[in-house]
Image (spheres, grey):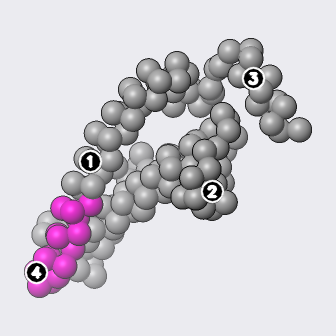
Amino acid sequence: LIIAFVVRLFWGVVGPKHARLTELWQPRAWLGALKGKRPSAQFGHDPFASLAYLGLFAMIAVMAVTGLALAGIELETGPLAGALAGRGGLEDFFEEPHEVVYLGIVVFVVVHIGALIFHERRSHIPMAQSMVSGYQYRSVDDQEDQSLDNK
């Protein structure tokens, strides 16, 4: 999990424009969406999807830290073993958040797959393909509309 997270962070720095971490930070779009403004058809992440991904990244970071701490406490292994080995009293402190975040990630994955299916059926845009390749292919009309929006 930690390696996959580091790879995703790296991809968020060097990957295509819409895979970049900077593309996920959209405070104006979040406020607009909360006020009921629907964003125009655009390439990249929906404002709520970007916020959900940032939440997922935070959960993964918590999962990684608590997992490393538990490995140090319970198994006396990993980078935190020296500082935490033999401190069984801290086990509950790290175990509860680790389990709660695990369930949060499972819920995120299930909702994400459901939203993907719903979105693809509603919009007929191949979202799964763009998630794998990093590129979103649309009809010529959608591309022209997007280029007009960017002017």
In the rendered structure, which disc, 1 or 2, sits on the residue that comes first in sequence? Answer: 2
Label 4, label 3: how far apart the Cα atoms are: 58 Å
In the rendered structure, which disc, 4 or 2, sits on the residue that comes first in sequence? Answer: 2
- The spot of residue 76 in percent (x, y) is 18, 70
Q: Which residue is mark 3?
A: 143
Q: Is residue 56 left or right of residue 89?
A: right
Q: Are marks 4 and 2 in contact (CB under 8 Å)?
A: no
Quadrant housing residue 28 = bottom right
Is residue 102 among the parts visible in the rendering?
A: yes
Q: Which residue is mark 2?
A: 32
Callout 1 crowding tier (Cα within 10 Å): few <14, some 14–19, many ≥20: few
Frontmost of labels 4 and 2 is 2
The three-letter code of the residue at mark 3 reads Gln
Find residue 88 and name its label: 4
Label 3, label 1: how far apart the Cα atoms are: 34 Å
Q: Are marks 4 and 3 in contact (CB under 8 Å)?
A: no
